[in-house]
Amino acid sequence: MKAYYSLKEDGFQAYWFEGSTYKDKVIIWMHGSGMNEKHCLADSEYMRRAGYSVLVLGFYYWQGMPKKMRGIPVDYVEKAVAELKRSGYDNIAIHGISSGAAYALLCASLIPEISLVIAVCPFDYVVEEPKIFGRPTGRSWFSWHGSDYPCALFTGLREKGFFGSIREYLKHDTEHRNEFLRSFYEHAALTEEARIKVENMQADVLLFAPERDNQWPSADAVRRMEKKLQDSGYPYRVRAVIYPKASHLLGTNPPESWKKAFPPEKKWPRECNEARKDCFAQEYSFLREWAR
């Protein structure tokens, strides 16, 4: 394995760190929206310290990659998995936070070689790219083999635009003033076509969410996925953890300045910190039981 993989030469962009204690177990580690190389490398360090082999992968926003969530190829992960297999690694996990968690779940549903998934604050549908100015484009966040994956449309944005949606939201919701982004997803047209087919995964799966996520309704998504897997007779391990007092900053080591943007961090600072610690501990425990 090379220390660095580039989009131009390798078809995916990533940094490789060979493990010590669990060298043969690889985690493809991804962050969420708007996270550059610096943030991804910093927040993935805990997994490298634990002794796992880690491929820190950029799916957008890194230098030389698109800055918009539009048509991001699942093919990046497919090519990374093929490179790992060629290098003799058969135990391949994928980890994602927020939009990276949705991407990780979609990748695992399409790439059977992935045998473990950790999704922190995920959503269970692929959605369209939102726009601040003008109406949404209808372009999906993700693509597969050159075609956009079907996506859920933001009905409110389409009817009223971004700023009109803000005005309408503030008229009707005085309790959750900092959850405007969440409202996009609560009112999106969630079709079966756009659903991530988690039942097609061939992987153990660990899901995390805060009960009241102000970015999007990740707890609702986790419950839907857990039920879908149970109802389908899913043969692999499934663990879902929903924290009553936590924020969208689960799975990270956020600076104090970031916490100011998340209401639960101000309301329950101690509980949010404890939830983060428990999230890391649950990840380690789940990985230790990874026998495949």
Image (spheres, helix red, strand yellow):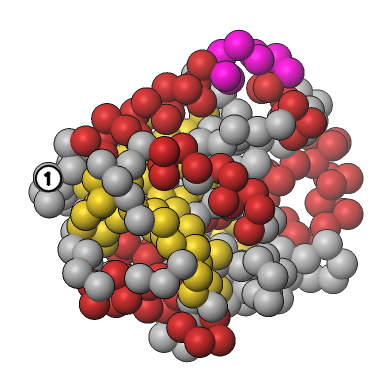
Q: Is residue 124 visible?
A: no
Q: In this view, does 136 lie to the left or right of 117?
A: right
Q: Is residue 226 left or right of residue 119?
A: left
- Which amino acid type is shown beneath numbered disc 1? Ala
In this rendering, the count of numbered labels is 1
- Residue at left 55%, top 67%? 59
Q: Where is residue 83 in the image (x, y as percent from the top left)?
A: 32, 76
Q: Where 24 falls versus 73 (above or below)?
A: above
In this orientation, which residue lies closer to the viewer: 191 or 113? 113
Q: Where 101 falls versus 196 (above or below)?
A: above
- Residue at left 29%, top 70%? 84
Q: Where 229 falls versus 58 (above or below)?
A: above
Q: Position of residue 103 (x, y in %)?
A: 46, 61
For the N terminus, the image quarter is: bottom left
Magenta part, dominant SS: helix
Q: Can residue 157 be seen in this view?
A: yes
- Residue at left 17%, top 36%? 289
- Residue at left 39%, top 63%? 106
Image quadrant of residue 262? Answer: top right
Image quadrant of residue 43? Answer: top right
In this orientation, which residue lies closer to the viewer: 77 or 267? 77
Q: Where is residue 165 in the image (x, y as percent from the top left)?
A: 81, 51
The residue identified by callout 1 is: 291
Element under disc 1: loop
Q: Where 27 falls versus 176 (above or below)?
A: below
- Magenta stretch bounds: 266-273
Q: Residues within 10 Å of mark 1 (few under 14, many from 20)?
A: few
Q: Position of residue 55 (x, y in %)?
A: 42, 60
In this orientation, which residue lies closer to the viewer: 151 or 155? 151
